[in-house]
Image (spheres, coloured by chain):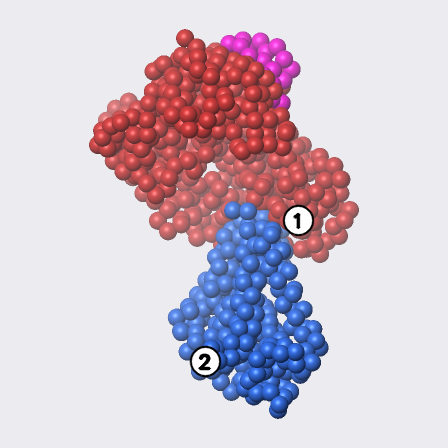
Chain colours: A red, B blue
Amino acid sequence: MTALAVADLRVRWATGAPAVRGVTFDLRAGETLGVVGASGSGKTALALAVLGLLPDGARAGGSVRLRGEELLGRSDAELSRIRGKDLAMVFQDLSSLNPVRTVGAQIAEAVRVHRRTTRAAARAQAVELLDLVGIPHAPQRARAYPHELSGGMQRRVLIAMAMAHDPSVLIADEPTAGLDVTVQAQILDVLRTARASGTATVLIAHDLGVVAGLADRVLVMHDGRAVEQGPAEQVYRRPRTPRTIALLRSAPRIAPRPARARPPGPAVLAVDALVRHHGAVRAVDGITFDVRRGETLALVGESGCGKTTALMEIVRLARPRRGRITVLGEDTATLRRARRRELRRDVQLVFQDPYASLNPRMRVRAIVAEPLTAHRLPARERVRELLDLVGLDPSHADRRPHELSGGQRQRVGIARALALEPRLLLLDEPVASLDATTQAGVLNLLQALQSRLGLAFVFVAHDLAVVHQIADRVAVMHAGRIVELGPADELYAAPAHPYTRALLDAIPIPDPVLERARPRVVLHGEAPDPANPPDGCRFRTRCPIHPALPPAARARCAASDPEPRPTGRPDHQVACHHPLPEPAPPTLRRTT
Amino acid sequence: MTRVAAGLVLLAALALLAAAGPALAPWAWDEIDFTAFGEGPSRRHWLGTTQHGRDVFAVTVHALRRSLLIGAAVAALATFLAALVGTVAGYAGGRADRALMWCADLLFVLPPFLLAAVLAPGAGTLALVAVLAGLMWTSTARMVRAAVRSLRDREHVLAARLAGVSAPRTIVRHVLPALASLLAVDAGLNVGAAIVAESGLAHLGFGVRPPGVSLGALVADGGPAVLAFPWRFAFPAALLVLTAVAANLLADGLRDALDPR
């Protein structure tokens, strides 16, 4: 049975600009349609038009039929009776939760909007729904307020609300945007259960990997049009239009690459047993690593693992509470004020959010010139040079940040960081807020700059596919500690720590066949509370191999937190009592 | 936008009246017409005379000038103080923050009129301005401090610090421009508030000292005899209300125009 039939849907914004130009698709019960496309391709406008939630002044034409009934042209009051009941939605924006009411009460409210039932019955159903979306201790969690739940949990609450009335169609717009891969995998599992109950799902995502594992059919959007539509396997494996091919090519994927030896020479940055606590919160709890000239070290881990804190601690160039930071051979604890200012020129930071890190009132020229003028250096010529270096046109110098695209803004941020000719560049999720295609451009730029200027990079990221593309060495952080450190290829091909393995397993592969076929270990639960980590090994409570260990081995995990020790492979260390064995076939490697 | 325009036009008209009024009036504000004491409006005295024989129009226009000047001076001084203390406290944090905010809290808990009544008598207009401004900066300073604290952690401010930009320059280039709308709105509101506060003090006898006059002093003088000599009360009172309304219209409109939320 056709649950949702969209025919020749057209949307114009209030300004008259077309957002969707004639999209047609059918969706059967229990089927999942993946809608993919770069930002600005009209995905969200499509979703809003189907839901009848377009902003004031925007107009939709064509036809949207829910189980045969036309939705376009109905009044908001009529649509309100359908929305949330037969036609449900999950948005990426978590602000749709009310901060002053418990999540249980909010779900119960969603239940009672469309069904006459007692308060108590609605409450009971809310708990059931929370359980359905995989929230542990549902009866207790129902009494929690949104801020007491993590981003992943809040997303689940939104899905629970959407599922309250067994809708025939669920529209999920970027339901996993901004989540860690581990949590993303959990959310996708929840959506899978929704599909099993017969709900037809429209899954909108810019990440082709997310859609690959779930969608039966895929619709590729570009510039408001559906440029390609078909069974997932066909679209991914035999794409017919150049747009789809470009989109697939830009999707970060982990492909084997030739191994590179560590460059020789002294460390540009050496961090030794660095500790940073915020009160009781052990944000960074003893980490050690070093970076050499021309080398990229990536710090990866879920949000809250301490990777950004570590970066900020380095960039301060001050005496750490405990541990030691050595930059270009100088211990930051012994620096005098003037020397610290000098050294600041050698250590620069690129921020995650190119919107927030550029002063909206300043022109690009002034932004890039700021570090130069602060150090009384001539700016005019150098600004042009820098813009050229990061691939921006000289005419961009007179623009303001809001007149630039996300990728261009990030390039301005990079130009500013390079103005003082630093030797160490700290990058805090520099591509996390960018589209896949833009991401690739910025990553290529960073790599080119590194080899040209001999920079050392410390690259903080949660996206392991991105990290694999740029990093020479990878340090995996969990709960304030480095659990595994080694060459990127080694670590991706044969992880020694079960956490690394789980992170890698959670990355969706942009190929429906491979994605569905591979064995997956979904990591349960979330990162431990950094104020109160479990004693012994901090990963113990989530570890997929821990429950299967013999009791004596398990006792060891509970007794002591493992220190990093060499695995026997070159430049590779792991902090685990029971590291994963190196996979057997070295013969295969030798023959190639 | 219409409110901003209305406020601006109204204020401009009042300022024009204050500036040109004395030249228009056939009488000087301190001139005494010994042939007319407490007379009603006539061709000779457009708005009548006081019981001392002064021309009500001339006196009121002169008082309007004084009130507007006091309002503007107090607003400028209070907003400047608030911006200075708020940014220093918010940006520096720590001990400086605690000390400055302790001072602000102290002024906050003291009844302002009592303080003004103790400090103002016998002093001139400048002292009155200083006292009013000294009482009005505290709440703005708290707002500025809160805004600066959140701005300080903004990435573009951190970026400037890491680029080696000095703290005062960072404040001037990256923090203050973001506060401009807040300060402009507050200065507007303070103009109205200062004029009204001065009137309140005048009513209690602590405002501008005679022979000087302000709108508040005139209203206070004319109040008791409002039934017998309504012209002595109505004109200054109307101007007082208009001024306050204009300043508030301007400030409110500015707030909505500059702050889309």
Quick check: is A95 in the magenta stretch?
no
Q: Position of residue A252 (x, y in %)?
A: 55, 24
Q: Nearer the viewer, residue A456 or A553?
A: A456
Q: Position of residue B104 (x, y in %)?
A: 45, 68
Inspect the magenta stretch and tell me whether residue A221 lies in it. yes
| A578 vs A405, nearest the viewer | A405
| Residue B258 locus on image (x, y percent) | 58, 51
- Chain letter of disc 1 in the image: A
The quarter of the picture where residue A353 lies is: top right
- Relative to A164, does residue A455 appear above or below in the rendering? below
Q: Amino acid at mark 2?
A: Pro
List the residue tagged with mark 2: B224
**x, y percentage for residue A162?**
37, 26
- In the rendering, which numbered label is found on residue A362? 1
**Circle 2 SS class:** helix
Disc 2 packing (10 Å; few <14; some 14–19; many ≥20): few
Q: Residue at x 38, y 17 (%)?
A: A168
Image: magenta residue range = A219-243
Which residue in the rendered view is the most extreme toward the right? A381
